[in-house]
Image (cartoon, helix red, strand yellow):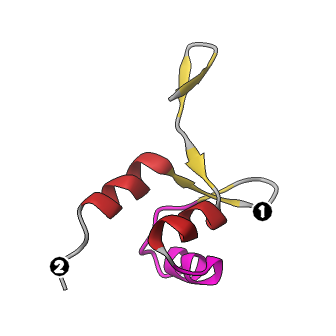
Amino acid sequence: MKRIGREPVPELLSTREVAGMFGVSPGTVIRWANEGLLPVIALPSGMRRYPAERIRAMLAFPADE
């Protein structure tokens, strides 16, 4: 985790990075985020970023079907 001053800054992933991790298209990642299936942070620029720690945790422990 990086720091700005004394505050830790979480690592954030782009839509394309998350898509690569899950093996899906960026459009699927956006849809999952819109449906509340992925945690997402909307930046003031309108770009989406995903908290790396939470995404990696989801990959390590897939949901039961």
Identify the residue at horizontal 56%, vertical 71% (top origin).
Answer: 19
Left or right of residue 18, residue 45 in this image: right
Residue that badge 1 annotates: 46
Which residue is outermost to the right?
A: 45
Q: Residues within 10 Å of mark 2 (few under 14, many from 20)?
A: few
Q: Where 47 sits versus 22, above or below?
A: above
Residue that badge 2 annotates: 64
- Label 2 or label 1, whichever comes before in sequence order: 1
Q: Position of residue 64 (x, y in %)?
A: 17, 79
Q: Which mark is residue 4?
A: none
Q: Position of residue 12 (x, y in %)?
A: 58, 47
- Res. 2 image quadrant: top right
Q: Residues within 10 Å of mark 1 (few under 14, many from 20)?
A: few
Give the spatial CA distance, label 2 vs label 1: 32 Å
User: Disc 2, disc 1: CB below 8 Å?
Assistant: no
Which residue is outermost to the top?
A: 6
Left or right of residue 48, residue 55 in this image: left
Q: Position of residue 65 (x, y in %)?
A: 19, 86
Identify the residue at horizontal 50%, vertical 50% (top origin).
Answer: 51
Tell me the SS state at disc 1: loop
Q: Where 42 sits versus 22, above or below?
A: above
Kindly report which numbered mark, 2 or 1, lies closer to the viewer in this rendering. 2
Bounds of the magenta segment: 24-40
Of 50 and 7, the residue lying toward us: 50
Q: Position of residue 63 (x, y in %)?
A: 23, 74
- 32 in magenta: yes
Tell me the SS state at disc 2: loop
Residue type indicated by callout 1: Gly
Identify the residue at horizontal 23%, vertical 62% (top origin).
Answer: 61
Identify the residue at horizontal 50%, vertical 29% (top origin).
Answer: 1
Residue type indicated by callout 2: Asp
Q: Where 54 sits versus 65, above or below?
A: above
